[in-house]
Image (spheres, rainbow, N blue to C red):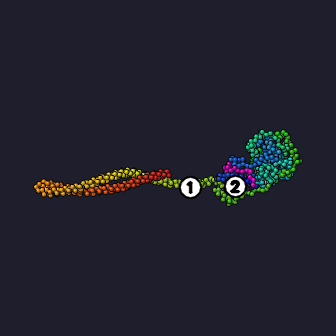
């Protein structure tokens, strides 16, 4: 995300880590600096750079480490290593963040840094400029501005207080101006800083871009760790600036007050620090201005509760008491050297050498456009969308969304900074609504389940009936199958018998042929007998004639001739009868032969029919097996459903 001027946002979101818990919204001191949105169904909260004042609280309190910030650390080290002429100013809070801060100076010098200045000296100049401004300008109350977050807030949200902002640069800029104008330093200037928001002051047109790098303590240490730098290996070095006064106290709450009270008596300095107090106080201060009430001479106000020692760009883990002990020890050391007593002489030197105009700060009066305020009708519509239909529901004010009141949440929704889904009460009512729908659906489902159960029971009954019928079919098919097997066996036996009959018929045909041949022989013999009988009769006739001619002598021959004739007649008659029977027998043999051929043809036809029947039975048997298998599969599939 980028700022309005096209630069990358200083504070940004790591979407992968953001869980949309709204903690950043809840703790943010300004309205609208966070925007809730969804990506791939997940809620995220991103920074609205236009309205963000870079207080850094969201970075500090995010338990998921989903917020981070950018500074100039990488660019600084790259430029320094490339030989760019750079002088460095170090915030006084380095004393509590780097126990061996003098070795930090030694390390920076080893990299080629030219001058290394303690911004405590710039703080001394700032105090001098404040006092001189109060004395010469006629201002009866000024708001101290060493904290850029306070300046951001006033310029964006309380522009009425710009005239009350101290018209003096911060200690960082006072040190930079001193280097540039009074020490003639032409180097590029970098600031080793405890503050994320110092980058805003650096890029502000009213600071003339004197400082080019904001290097936060935390990113500086991360860089050293990443590069494997061990500070203990470097020599201790001292700052290059002139000896100062109490400017080193600036980083702790009330540090400015201590400086002012050390130089002026009976001055009213209001000390305020921390996001939970600072912005509420500024609103109250504005009201006092409107009401014409008396104001503190100086408002010593800081964004961070524990001052710059635990600023937004630090990683200081010391307890506040340990920080105080470090500063108190330093203070005692300074007092022993008499530097506190030299404050007056330092102010005198400043009066002699410095020009107040050189350190004068201007501010931009370009407040943000106020957020759109919904009309009563629009509030009503939003509340109805949030399921807030009663006054009590509209004052639920649980703050789970991150806003203090339901009305603030409605306003955020109206300005597209938040969504209905971030309201826990809305979600609760949505759940109730959905529960009602679920109950209705459950009732409907219950009814459907009953119907399904009923249908299931019917289906089970039908399944049982189907199973029973299929089993009956299967049983019948098995019986048919068994019958077919028996039929096949019987057909095979018949086929064998037919084959036997065919074989016997063939034998009968053979025998008939033999008989026919024998009958033919017999016929020929009978014909011969008939011929012999005829010849014998002729002989007997001839013998009878001869006997008659012989008279008495031929009587015996005549008798013999008569007997021969008689025998010949009987043979002829017998032969003729045999011939007659032979013809009949021949016809019978021929008829038997013909019947045998007919039987053979019929048996051949029967055999073919039997073969066809056997094939049909086998096919029917195979189909029956398939039907049994299919019926069994139907039952199995039905049961599986």
Q: Residue furthest front?
A: 550
Using the numbered discs, state the Cα–Cα distance from disc 1 to disc 2 in whole angstroms.
35 Å
Element carrying mark 1: helix
Q: Position of residue 175 (x, y in %)?
A: 83, 47
Furthest-right residue in this view = 352
Residue at x 77% of width, y 42% of height: 98
Q: Quadrant of residue 118?
A: top right
Q: Residues within 10 Å of mark 1 (few under 14, many from 20)?
A: few
Q: Name the residue tied to disc 2.
A: 417
For disc 2, the neighbor class at 10 Å (few under 14, some 14 to 19, many from 20) is many
Q: Position of residue 349 (x, y in %)?
A: 88, 46
Decide whether residue 12 is among the magenta residues.
yes
Mark 1 and mark 2 lie on one chain; the one further toward the N terminus is 2
Kindly report which numbered mark, 1 or 2, lies closer to the viewer in this rendering: 2
Q: Is residue 377 above or below residue 314?
A: below
Which residues make up the magenta segment? Answer: 6-20
The residue sitting at 80% across, 53% down in the picture is 205
Q: Which mark is residue 61?
A: none
For residue 298, say whether it is visible: no
Instruction: Identify which residue, 398 or 322, lies in the foreground.
Output: 322
Q: Name the foreground residue: 145 vs 134.
A: 145
Give the left or right position of residue 311, taking residue 619 as reference.
right
How far across and down, in percent of the image, does residue 168 sit?
82, 51
Circle 2 sits in a helix, a strand or a loop, which is it? Answer: loop
Q: Is residue 553 magenta?
A: no
Prevailing secondary structure class for the magenta stretch in the rendered image: loop
423 sits to left or right of 294 = left
Query: Disc 1 designates what residue?
Result: 440
In this picture, residue 615 sits left or right of residue 324: left
The percent position of residue 91, horizontal first and vertical second, equals: 79, 45
The reply to whether residue 539 is visible in this rendering is: yes
């Amino acid at each position: 995300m980028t700022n309005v001027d096209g630069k990358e946002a200083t504070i940004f979101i790591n979407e992968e880590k953001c869980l949309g818990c709204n903690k950043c919204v809840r703790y943010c001191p300004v309205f609208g600096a966070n925007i809730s949105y969804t990506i791939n169904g997940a809620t995220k909260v991103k920074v609205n750079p236009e309205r963000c004042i870079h207080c850094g609280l969201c970075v500090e309190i995010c338990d998921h480490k989903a917020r981070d910030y950018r500074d100039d650390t990488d660019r600084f080290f790259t430029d320094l290593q490339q030989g760019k002429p750079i002088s460095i100013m170090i915030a006084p809070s380095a004393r509590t963040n780097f126990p061996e801060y003098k070795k930090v100076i030694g390390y920076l010098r080893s990299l080629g840094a030219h001058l290394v200045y303690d911004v405590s000296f710039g703080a001394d100049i700032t105090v001098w400029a404040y006092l001189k401004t109060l004395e010469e300008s006629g201002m009866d109350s000024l708001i101290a501005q060493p904290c850029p977050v306070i300046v951001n807030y006033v310029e964006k949200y309380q522009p009425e207080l710009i005239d009350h902002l101290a018209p003096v640069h911060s200690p960082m800029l006072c040190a930079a101006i001193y280097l540039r104008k009074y020490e003639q330093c032409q180097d590029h200037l970098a600031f080793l800083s405890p503050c994320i928001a110092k980058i805003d002051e650096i890029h502000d047109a009213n600071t003339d871009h004197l400082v080019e790098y904001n290097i936060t303590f935390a990113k500086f240490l991360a860089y050293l760790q990443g590069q494997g730098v061990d500070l203990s290996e470097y020599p201790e070095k001292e700052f290059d600036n002139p000896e100062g006064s109490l400017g080193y106290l600036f980083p702790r709450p009330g540090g400015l007050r201590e400086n002012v009270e050390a130089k002026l008596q009976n001055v009213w300095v209001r000390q305020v620090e921390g996001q939970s107090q600072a912005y509420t106080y500024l609103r109250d201060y504005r009201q006092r201005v409107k009401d014409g009430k008396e104001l503190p001479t100086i408002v010593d106000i800081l964004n961070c509760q524990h001052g710059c020692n635990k600023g937004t760009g630090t990683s200081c883990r010391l307890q506040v008491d340990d920080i105080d002990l470090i500063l108190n020890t330093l203070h005692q050391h300074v007092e022993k050297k008499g530097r506190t007593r030299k404050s007056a002489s330092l102010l005198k030197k400043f009066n002699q050498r410095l020009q107040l105009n050189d350190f004068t700060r201007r501010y931009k009066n370009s407040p943000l456009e106020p957020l759109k305020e919904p009309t009563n009708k629009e509030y009503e519509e939003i509340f109805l969308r949030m399921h807030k239909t009663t006054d009590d529901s509209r004052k639920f004010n649980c703050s789970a969304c991150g806003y203090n009141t339901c009305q603030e949440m409605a306003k955020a929704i109206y300005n597209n900074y938040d969504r209905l889904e971030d309201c826990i009460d809305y979600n609760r009512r949505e759940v109730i609504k959905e529960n009602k729908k679920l109950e209705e659906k459950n009732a409907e489902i219950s009814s459907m389940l009953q119907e399904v159960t009923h249908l299931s029971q019917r289906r089970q009954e039908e399944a049982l009936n189907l199973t029973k019928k299929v089993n009956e079919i299967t049983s019948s098919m098995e019986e048919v199958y068994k019958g077919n097997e028996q039929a096949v066996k019987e057909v095979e036996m018949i086929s064998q018998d037919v084959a036997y009959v065919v074989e016997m018929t063939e034998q009968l045909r053979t025998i008939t042929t033999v008989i026919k041949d024998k009958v033919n022989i017999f016929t020929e013999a009978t014909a011969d007998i008939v011929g012999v009988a005829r010849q014998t009769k002729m002989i007997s006739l001839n013998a009878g004639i001869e006997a008659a001619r012989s008279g008495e002598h031929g009587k015996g021959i005549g008798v013999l001739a008569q007997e021969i004739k008689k025998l010949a007649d009987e043979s002829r008659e017998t032969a003729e009868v045999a011939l007659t029977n032979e013809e009949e027998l021949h016809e019978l043999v021929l008829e038997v032969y013909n019947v045998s051929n007919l039987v053979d043809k019929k048996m051949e036809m029967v055999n073919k029919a039997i073969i066809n029947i056997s094939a049909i039975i086998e096919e029917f048997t195979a189909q029956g097996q398939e039907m049994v298998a299919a019926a069994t599969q139907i039952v199995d599939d039905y049961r599986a459903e």
